[in-house]
Image (cartoon, helix red, strand yellow):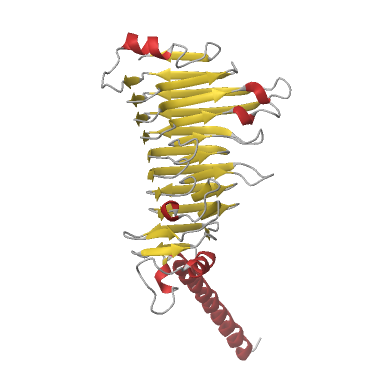
């Protein structure tokens, strides 16, 4: 091989290696660029307003479609009833002072933020205000602040959702699809929503931690947190609720209604509630399992554990359990009860009350203990 060929081969190798290094460097740069948060402010039109008076839904949706890491600027943005759809592998952060305000609508069904068939989404400090006060219709109860359908690995922290026509947060599944999986909601406040603070229809893997849900009023069931499967295809599996406070709900602090989960094959369910405090709701905690929808002899098999509840000032009763399926085990551990007159009940008084027909039907598979 002559010296020219050797030089040419050597030069080619050097250039190739430089190209590879260059491509790696560009790839790293692109990766870093993708990780940098994109501010919604950068996609708004010229002379945009900062007082929440102009509808910027389409602009915001463009950013949500294009970028994975997004921040909302520190001023209110008006959104119409089309709502905003989040995509997989995204992180949305609301800066101090930012909020989404729903433009008044007559629609009975909307979601201001919706996750549908997506995965790995994080919402940080979302502030959402519904149109309840200025709603232009009178029908329906399905105007949601945040909706999660058949989605997985969803994290919401620091949410503040208020004044929605329906629920503050709604967790379910798409028809003929699977339940939502691994949803974590923490340090969040739901208030003055017309139906429930949070409604859970179908989920496998849910953690609610440090939630405040209060003043849900307008249409039944008006509960702070409501577990209500709508079909035998729905799931209530691997659920933990801890350090939650519900307050002043005309319905219930926490409600679990299992009537509609019957109608198919046997079901399993498990819910653990630790350190629930309710103050001033009509009923502190309510659970019901009616077998009237059985088609054969199917049962719902599982355990509901309520540990260290603190029920105060409940107009009707601290607890109401109507469980007619003995495969559902209800365990209440170390409850604190304060009457509407401010009296804190002794252990014997709590036993007499909670074991009475006022609170628990005789057929229930029920255990009360004090540690």
In the image: residue 249, left or right of residue 221 = left
Query: What residue occupies the far right of the structure in this picture?
Result: 296
Residue occupying the point 36% across, 35% down: 248
The residue nearer to you, when weighing 68 against 320, is 320
The residue nearer to you, when weighing 137 against 164, is 137
Q: What is the number of callouts on the image? A: 0
Q: Where's residue 96, x and y in %? A: 31, 59
Residue occupying the point 46% across, 18% down: 331
Query: What residue occupies the far left of the structure in this picture?
Result: 342
Splitting the image into 4 quarters, where does residue 336 fall? top left
Q: Where's residue 51, x and y in %? A: 35, 67
Q: Where's residue 124, x and y in %? A: 40, 53
In this rendering, the answer to whether 111 lies above or below 74 is above
| Quadrant where the C terminus is found in the figure | top left
| Quadrant where the N terminus is found in the figure | bottom right
Residue occupying the point 42% across, 59% down: 101
Q: Where's residue 79, x and y in %? A: 47, 62
Query: What residue occupies the far bottom of the structure in this picture?
Result: 4
In the image: residue 345, left or right of residue 233 = left
In this rendering, the answer to whether 284 lies above or below 121 is above
Residue occupying the point 32% across, 60% down: 97
The residue nearer to you, when weighing 345 against 96, is 345
Splitting the image into 4 quarters, where does residue 347 fall? top left
């Amino acid at each position: 091989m002559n010296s020219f060929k050797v030089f040419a081969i050597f030069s080619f190798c050097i250039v190739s290696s430089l190209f590879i290094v260059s491509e790696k460097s560009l790839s790293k740069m692109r990766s870093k660029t993708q990780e940098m948060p994109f501010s919604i402010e950068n996609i708004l039109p010229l002379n945009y307003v900062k007082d929440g008076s102009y509808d910027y839904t389409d602009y915001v949706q463009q950013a949500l479609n294009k970028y994975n890491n997004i921040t909302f600027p520190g001023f209110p943005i008006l959104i119409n009833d089309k709502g905003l759809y989040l995509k997989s592998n995204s992180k949305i952060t609301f800066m101090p002072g930012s909020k989404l305000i729903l433009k008044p609508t007559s629609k009975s069904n909307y979601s201001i933020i919706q996750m549908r068939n997506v995965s790995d989404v994080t919402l940080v400090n979302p502030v959402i205000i519904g149109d309840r006060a200025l709603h232009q219709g009178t029908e329906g109860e399905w105007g949601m602040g945040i909706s999660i359908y058949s989605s997985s690995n969803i994290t919401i922290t620091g949410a503040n959702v208020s004044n929605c026509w329906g629920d503050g947060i709604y967790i379910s599944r798409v028809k003929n699809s699977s339940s939502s999986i691994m949803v974590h909601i923490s340090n969040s406040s739901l208030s003055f929503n017309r139906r429930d603070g949070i409604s859970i229809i179908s989920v496998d893997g849910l953690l609610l931690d440090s939630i405040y849900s209060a003043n849900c009023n307008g249409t039944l069931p008006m509960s702070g947190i409501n577990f209500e499967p709508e079909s035998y295809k729905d799931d209530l599996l691997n659920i933990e609720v801890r350090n939650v406070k519900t307050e002043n709900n005309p319905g219930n602090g926490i409600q679990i209604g299992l009537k509609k989960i019957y109608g198919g094959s046997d079901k399993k369910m498990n819910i653990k509630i630790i350190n629930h405090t309710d103050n001033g709701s009509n009923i502190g905690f309510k659970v019901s399992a009616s077998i009237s929808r059985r088609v054969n002899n199917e049962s719902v098999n599982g355990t509901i554990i309520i540990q260290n509840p603190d029920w105060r000032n409940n107009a009707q009763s601290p607890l109401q359990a109507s469980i007619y399926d003995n495969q559902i085990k209800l365990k209440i551990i170390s409850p604190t009860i304060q009457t509407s007159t401010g009296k804190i009940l002794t252990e014997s008084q709590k036993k007499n009350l909670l074991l009475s027909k006022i609170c628990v039907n005789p057929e229930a598979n029920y255990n009360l203990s004090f540690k």
